[in-house]
Amino acid sequence: MRVIRVGTRKSQLARIQTDSVVAMLKAFYPGLQFEIVAMSTTGDKILDTALSKIGEKSLFTKELEHALEKNEVDLVVHSLKDLPTVLPPGFTIGAICKRENPYDAVVFHPKFVGKTLETLPEKSVVGTSSLRRAAQLQRKFPHLEFKSIRGNLNTRLRKLDELQEFSAIILAAAGLQRMGWQHRVGQILHPEECMYAVGQGALGVEVRAKDQDMLDLVGVLHDLETLLRCIAERAFLRHLEGGCSVPVAVHTAMKDGQLYLTGGVWSLDGSDSMQETMQATIRVTAQQEDGPEDDPQLVGITARNIPREAQLAAENLGISLASLLLNKGAKNILDVARQLNDAH
C-alpha cells in the first residue's frame, strides 16, 4: 500500500487542520495510506517577539518546505494566510480547500463575558499579534489599548484567562471553530469593523512544483469559489508588496458570476487609511489545455483542473485594485507603516 507523508506544524490546531485534509484525501483515495510528520517552525520557536518584528516572510513554513525539498514529506498542510504570496522556487500550492468563516472573533476574559469591544471599559487592553487587526480596531474603538500577544491558540487563551492583563483577545474565527471552542466567541467582527487577512479561513496544500503526481492527487481538493477569491486576495497583496509588517486587509464575495474584492491599507495606529472595492465578471467555461511552456502558477497556486480564464480574471482583479490604491497614495501609508514597524 502506497504511503503519502504529510508535513504539518506541531500545534494542536495545525494537527486538526492536517487531519481534516487527510480525511478528505482518504475519501477520494481509500487505497492510500497517510503518515503525518509533525515539526516545529521558526514562528513556533520565537514566542517573545511580535510576528511583524521577526522580519522573516516564511515564519511558519520554512522548515516544512525544507522537508518537502529533501523529499522527507510529499505534501504540507498550511493555513493559507501563513503562505507568502511569492513561494520559494520549486514549490507550489496544489490545493486550496473550501474556506471556513474568514472573520475575526473576540474572546473575552471571563469577567467581561457578555460585553462587546464597544462596551468594554475605557483603557481595556486587547491582545492581538496582528498589525492588521490592531490598526483597524484602534481606529474603530479609540477607547481601547492594543497589545501584542503571541503563542498558539491554547497559550493565548490561557494568557487571557489566567493573567489579569487582557480584557479580550482577537483570534481567527476559523481556528476557534476547528478547535471546537465556538462557545468562547463573544463577538464576530464584520468587515465594517475589521476586514480579514488574505487567505484567512482557508487551508492550502503545498507540494513540489514539478511533482505532477502529487499535483494530480491533491488537485481534487480545490474549491472553485475559495480558489478564485484567494487568487484575487493574494494578487492584491502581492501587487501592494504587503506582508506581516504592514496592515493590509481584504473582503471578498462571489455572487451571480461576479467576484467582489474590497481591499484596504492602514497606518499602524489606524489614523490613516484607504480602501476601495472593485468587481470582475468570472466566466467558468470549459478548460483549455495549457501548453507545456505555460507556467501554470498564479500567485503561487497551481490549479490545472480549474478554468484558466477564471483564474486570470481573479488575478487581474487583485492587481487592478492594488494599482488603484497605489495611484491614490497607498504606497506612502505602507512605507511609513513599514519604517515605523522596523524602528520600534
Image (spheres, grey):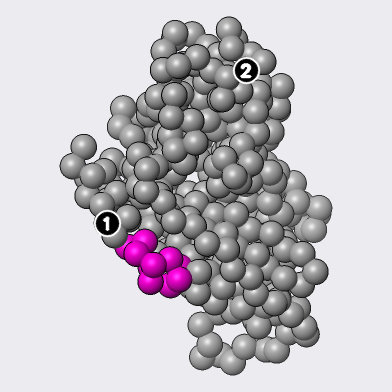
Residue 230 visible in the current orientation: no
Q: Residue at x 27, y 56 (%)?
A: 335
Q: Position of residue 210 (x, y in %)?
A: 51, 74
Q: How far apart, in angstroms, are the residues tagged by discs 1 and 2?
A: 36 Å
What secondary structure prevails in the magenta region?
helix
Q: Is residue 323 above or below residue 336?
A: below
In this figure, which residue is indicated by the disc labeled 2? 115
Q: Residue at x 50, y 74 (%)?
A: 320
Q: Residue furthest left?
A: 343
Q: Position of residue 164 (x, y in %)?
A: 44, 8
Q: Quadrant of residue 18?
A: top right
In the rendered structure, the answer to whether residue 223 lies left or right of residue 344 reads right
Q: Amino acid at mark 2?
A: Lys
Q: Can you say which quadrant of the picture contains the C terminus?
A: top left
Q: Quadrant of residue 146?
A: top left
**Residue 326 colored magenta?**
yes
In this figure, which residue is indicated by the disc labeled 1? 335
* Magenta span of residues: 322-331
Q: Amino acid at mark 1?
A: Asp
Residue 288 visible in the current orientation: yes
